[in-house]
């Protein structure tokens, strides 16, 4: 079994300069290459080249994050789905990928559920319609649903730099 405590198993070649760039962008993703270059006392081209490499290798993505509440998405559920033993859970995942309000899908090794999803809607009717649709899917054996009323922390992709190695 792979030792999960081994801190040197990263697949990417990143150095201290890359970590500094990532750290700055984690604090404020709109920091320009020239501002980063000034702060780190290197050339603008160095920062641009490194940032582009980090993005190309999939290590870094900079994007805007929206507040769902500001857009009227006030209703959220987390659902844990168990599929029927003889069914293909990938076909259900493919269907879920097409549902507009589903914003998180993960597969699990159980013990009681093999698909975990998050869904958001603007009304309780949105939740009801989605859950009724989900219950009618041939692959579904059971669903456990939690209604989320307050998100305290969210940040699957927010990895503190000191946890990288």
Image: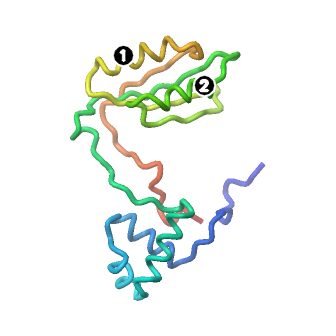
Which residue is drawn at the image coordinates 44% and 21% (left, top)? 145
Q: Quadrant of residue 25?
A: bottom left
Residue for badge 2? 91
Say which of marks 2 and 1 sits in front.
2
- x, y (%) of residue 85? 69, 17
**Which of the marked residues, 2 or 1, is nearer the chain's N terminus?**
2
Q: Looking at this view, is 28 or 152 the one in front?
A: 28
Give left or right: position of 83 versus 21.
Answer: right
Task: Judge the density around disc 2: few (<14), some (14-19), many (≥20) Cα neighbours within 10 Å.
Answer: few
Vertical relation: 37 (above or below) 164 = below
Q: Looking at this view, is 57 or 128 the one in front?
A: 57
Looking at the rendered structure, the secondary structure element under dot 1 is: helix
* Residue that lies at the very extreme toward the right in this rendered image: 1
CA–CA distance between discs 2 and 1? 20 Å
Task: Judge the density around disc 1: few (<14), some (14-19), many (≥20) Cα neighbours within 10 Å.
Answer: few
Vertical relation: 155 (above or below) 74 = below
- x, y (%) of residue 1? 78, 48
Which residue is drawn at the image coordinates 60% and 65% (left, top)? 165
Residue for badge 1? 129
Q: In which quarter of the image is residue 9?
A: bottom right
Looking at the rendered structure, the secondary structure element under dot 2 is: helix
Vertical relation: 60 (above or below) 36 = above
Give left or right: position of 81 versus 13.
Answer: left
Which residue is drawn at the image coordinates 61% and 33% (left, top)? 108
- x, y (%) of residue 81? 54, 22
């Amino acid at each position: 079994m792979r030792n999960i405590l081994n801190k040197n198993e990263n697949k990417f070649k990143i150095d201290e300069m890359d970590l500094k760039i990532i750290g700055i962008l984690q604090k404020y993703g709109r920091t320009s290459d020239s501002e980063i270059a000034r702060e780190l006392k290197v050339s603008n081209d160095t920062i641009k080249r490194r940032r582009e490499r980090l993005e190309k290798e999939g290590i870094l993505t900079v994007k805007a994050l929206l507040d769902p509440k500001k857009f009227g998405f006030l209703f959220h559920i987390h659902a844990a789905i168990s599929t029927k033993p003889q069914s293909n859970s990938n076909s259900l995942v493919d269907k879920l990928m097409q549902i507009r309000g589903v914003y998180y899908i993960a597969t699990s090794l159980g013990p009681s559920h093999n698909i975990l999803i998050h869904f958001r809607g603007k009304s309780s009717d949105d939740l009801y319609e989605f859950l009724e649709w989900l219950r009618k899917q041939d692959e579904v054996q059971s669903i456990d649903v939690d209604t989320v009323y307050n998100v305290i922390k969210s940040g699957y992709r927010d990895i503190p730099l000191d946890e990288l190695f």
